[in-house]
Amino acid sequence: MESLLPTELWRNGPQPGSLYNFPGGKIAGHNEPVKRTMYPIVTGTSVLGLKFKDGVVLAADKLGSYGSMAKFRDLTRLLKVNDQTVVGAGGDYADYQFLTEIIEQRVIEEECLNDGFGYTPSSLFSWLTRVMYNRRSNINPLWNTYVVAGWQKGEGFLGYVDKIGTAYQAPTIATGYGAYIAQPLLREALEKNPNMTAEQAAEQLDRCLKVLYYRDARSLNKYDLAIITKDGVEIRSSIVSKTNWEIAHMIKGYE
């Protein structure tokens, strides 16, 4: 009878003084890095930028998605750095807030020097590439894609930096889902009218954001718009695109 009973008091359990490893889980050792930044929680989607004859326009919608839930509908993803530079960000909103605090503090420190110099679009763009690549190299990336827009040396500036430090400059930039849908529309519009005005450029961004609202489940038809020219930065907040769903009932087969 005794041979039929298990001899172990705690089968497959931990050793005395240790912790139990649940199935499918893993307890990180003391030498393993913290990996919270690898799993963004609240995220923003596309940022669009377009050069026009006298400057640059930049736009980003105001939705913060909690996974697939459209939870936060009034987030700002455009940061006015100074009178000649604006930064837009997509990706993890917490990482964006973290870097925003650093940028704002650096701007304050630069102003306290009172030496007549400040952050230009190209200098901030270069700094961002170093920060993002450094964090990526340390296996602790900031889960963001940044677009830097501004006015420098008598012309507009528009640059792109992603979470692994990849960077480039271009007359049209779209991040996130917009890189697949909005980028072709922006390039086509710029080819047809290379000398467009600020209002024409703003209309093109509104058109692209409207298309993204129709096609991207993580976007919203309310957005912020920044216009950067030699006269400074103009921020237009909470612009609402007019949408039309009259033919929505005819679209079938995607249920």
Image: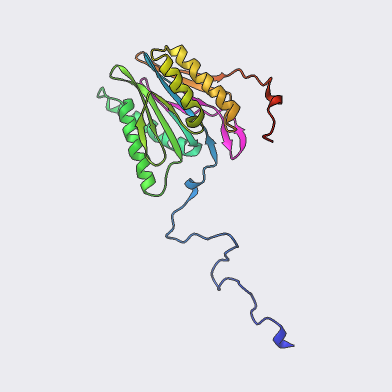
Instruction: Find residue 129 and report its horizontal and vertical position in percent.
Output: 34, 37
Instruction: Verify whether residue 61 appears in magenta.
Output: yes
Give the magenta-colored segment's residue range: 59-87
Residue under the image location 55 percent in, 66 percent down: 19
**In the rendered image of this protein, does residue 66 appear above or below residue 152?**
below
Instruction: Find residue 80 and report its horizontal and vertical position in percent.
Output: 42, 24
Quarter-wise, where is residue 239 in the image?
Answer: top right
Judge left or right: residue 166 versus residue 201: left
Residue under the image location 72 percent in, 84 percent down: 4
**In the rendered image of this protein, does residue 145 appear above or below residue 153?**
below
Q: Nearer the viewer, residue 204 or 17?
A: 204
Q: Nearer the viewer, residue 30 or 121?
A: 121
Dominant secondary structure, magenta: strand
Q: How many marks?
A: 0
Quarter-wise, where is residue 42 in the image?
Answer: top right
Instruction: Verify whether residue 163 appears in magenta.
Output: no
